[in-house]
Image: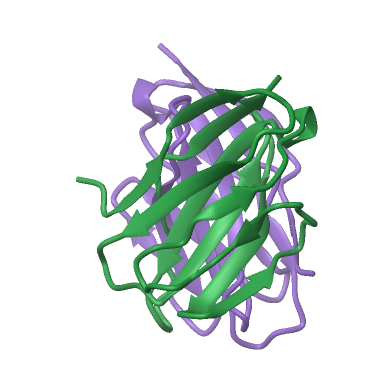
């Protein structure tokens, strides 16, 4: 089974500041995809950003950017200009060749006013 | 507007009862998934389907069963519910080689 590690169980960030959420993964596949999802307290899973293993550029989606370091097998999420609505749990996930998406343990982000 | 629907959203049931959690998607996605998630914890894949009449168990062992008779429908059944089955069950789907999973709103099951 693939392994995704998120070492930060919880983080606090001041409104309007940036926050980086760590994610490392382990796979022997050459082709894979990396994802970040947001889960608010309501429970739904919201897709944020995707990075393919062969993509040379780091992915960006609005205030979200993914810092992809392939050799280190890391895919950190950066949220810029944090907003109160960003308070949620954030999951890193990886899709190997068999399309079975595996998730990390998640990081809870709390944005302070 | 949700394109993947799960019912019921909340279910409280007694031990020993049979339950079916429904999941339907209107996007024509070929792949569908069931994940189990305890509060504040990671998601664990319990079932997935590559297409009609194709189902396989995921990485986490589960006493539940699934079926995929139609592309759009992927129900999950527990023949005899137990308190250990109390959890949130999330259904998801994706299209072919596309990568993004679209999730339903989830079904929160409580077994007394």
Q: Residue furthest bottom?
A: A30
Q: Position of residue A110 (x, y in %)?
A: 52, 22
Q: Chain B drawn in what color? A: green
Q: Position of residue A60 (x, y in %)?
A: 36, 60
- Left or right of B69 in this view: A93: right
Q: Residue furthest top?
A: A113
Quadrant of the image occupied by residue B26: bottom left
Scheme of colours in the image: by chain
Quick check: B14 above or below B45? above
- Left or right of A56 in this view: A106: right
In this view, the residue in front, B51 or A51, is B51
Q: Is residue A102 visible?
A: no
Quick check: B42 above or below A82? below
Q: Position of residue A61 (x, y in %)?
A: 32, 56
In this view, the residue in front, A102 or B23, is B23
Residue at (46, 42) in percent of width and height: A38
Quadrant of the drawing holding the N terminus of chain A: bottom right
Q: Is residue A16 visible?
A: yes
Q: Chain A drawn in what color? A: purple
Quadrant of the image occupied by residue A12: top right
Quadrant of the image occupied by residue A73: bottom right
Residue at (43, 38) in percent of width and height: A44
Residue at (50, 45) in percent of width and height: B21
Residue at (48, 25) in percent of width and height: A41
Q: Position of residue B20 (x, y in %)?
A: 53, 45
Number of labels in the image equals 0
In this view, the residue in front, B69 or A28, is B69
Q: Residue furthest left?
A: B1
Quadrant of the drawing holding the C terminus of chain A: top left
- Left or right of B57 in this view: B92: left
């Amino acid at each position: 089974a693939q392994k995704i590690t998120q070492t930060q169980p919880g983080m606090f960030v001041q409104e309007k500041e940036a926050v980086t959420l760590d994610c490392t993964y382990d796979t022997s596949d050459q082709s894979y995809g990396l994802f970040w999802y947001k889960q608010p307290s309501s429970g739904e899973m919201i897709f944020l950003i995707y990075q393919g293993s062969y993509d040379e550029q780091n992915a960006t989606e609005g205030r979200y950017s993914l810092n992809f370091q392939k050799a280190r097998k890391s895919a950190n999420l950066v949220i810029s200009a944090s907003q109160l609505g960003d308070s949620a749990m954030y999951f890193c996930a990886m899709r190997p060749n068999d399309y079975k998406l595996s998730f990390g343990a998640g990081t809870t982000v709390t944005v302070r006013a | 507007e949700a394109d993947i629907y799960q019912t019921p959203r909340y279910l409280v049931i007694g031990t020993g009862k049979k339950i079916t959690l429904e999941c339907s998607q209107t996007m024509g996605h070929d792949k569908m998934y069931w994940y189990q998630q305890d509060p504040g914890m990671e998601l664990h894949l319990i079932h997935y389907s590559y297409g009609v009449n194709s189902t396989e168990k995921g990485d986490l062992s589960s006493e539940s069963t699934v079926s995929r008779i139609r592309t759009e429908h992927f129900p999950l059944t527990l023949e005899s519910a137990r308190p250990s089955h109390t959890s949130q069950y999330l259904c998801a789907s994706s299209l072919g080689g596309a990568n993004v999973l679209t999730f339903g709103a989830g079904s929160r099951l409580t077994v007394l």
